[in-house]
Image (cartoon, rainbow, N blue to C red):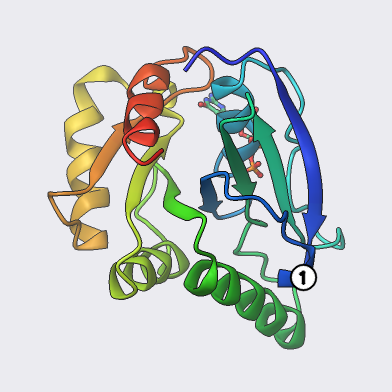
Amino acid sequence: MKVHNAEIVISAVSPKQYPETSIPEIALAGRSNVGKSSFINTLINRKNLARTSGKPGKTQTLNFYLIEDALHFVDVPGYGYAKVSKTERAKWGEMIETYMTTREQLKAVVSLIDLRHTPTQEDIQMYEFLKYYDIPVIVVATKKDKIPRGKWNKHESMVKKALNFDKSDDFILFSSQTKEGKEEAWQAIEKYL
Ligand code: GDP
């Protein structure tokens, strides 16, 4: 998709704040610092529309971005902050679960995983959750440019093994630095629109 227009529509915490449209939604999930904002900005050709997300203490909201009047990207707050209290974590979980399991407009979730490291317990849980609810998932392995070319395969296998990856899902190696994987990511997303 060639993107010229992208704007934030709303930051929502509860279903009554979700936009009342039938525009298809693609949600983006991943641990803090995985490169989610950079991924969104790369796909929509912006430097800084999606802010570097989920810094500790920042309000945890679902941010809806309208892209070309054709779809919404729904930026899910990053998981994996050790400092967040149990209560906050539970609230976060409830918000995500409500959104992902009830939202009819949700067509697929882009699950971002850092290609450099073994997926965290939370990465694995997110993938299992999506598989359990039969929500289509596109795995995007980020920061490809930080791994030497000769090791791409090894890292891909490591990530897939930890996730118990389903071969029928999309798996895309991505770099917001080199923009590798951008077209492939759009193609995977457009299948669901
Ligand atoms: P978020 O917290 O998941 O939204 O992550 P950000 O997009 O803010 O990225 C976190 C950090 O990783 C920032 O310093 C980015 O510049 C860096 N980063 C994100 N994507 C890439 C990438 O593909 N390659 C490299 N080398 N750095 C990246």
Numbered marks: total? 1
Q: Amino acid at mark 1?
A: Lys
Q: Is mark 1 within 8 Å of ligand 1?
A: no
Asked which quadrant contains residue 7, the reply is top right
Can you say whether 192 is above or below 22 in the image? above
> Residue drawn at (67%, 65%), measured in percent from left and top?
81
Q: Look at the image and tell me whether residue 115 can be seen.
A: no
Q: Look at the image and tell me whether residue 125 can be seen.
A: yes
> Residue drawn at (52%, 55%), measured in percent from left and top?
105
Can you say whether 66 is above or below 162 in the image? above
Of residues 192 and 11, the one drawn nearer to the viewer in this rendering: 192
Where in the figure is residue 147, as x and y percent of width and height? 36, 26
* Residue 83 shown left or right of residue 67 in the figure: right
* Residue 62 shown left or right of residue 101 in the figure: right
Q: Residue furthest bottom?
A: 87
* Residue 71 shown left or right of residue 21 in the figure: left
Where in the figure is residue 174, as x and y percent of width and height? 40, 27
**Ligand 1 quarter of the rendering:** top right
Of residues 145 and 99, the one drawn nearer to the viewer in this rendering: 99
Q: Residue furthest left?
A: 167
Of residues 142 and 184, the one drawn nearer to the viewer in this rendering: 184
**Tag 1 secondary structure:** helix
Can you say whether 21 is above or below 116 in the image? below
Q: Which image quadrant: the C terminus? A: top left
Disc 1 target residue = 16
Classed neighbour count for the residue bearing mark 1: other residues with Cα under 10 Å, few (<14), some (14–19), many (≥20)? few
* Residue 130 shown left or right of residue 23 in the figure: left
Asked which quadrant contains residue 119, the reply is bottom left
Where in the figure is residue 157, as x and y percent of width and height? 17, 45
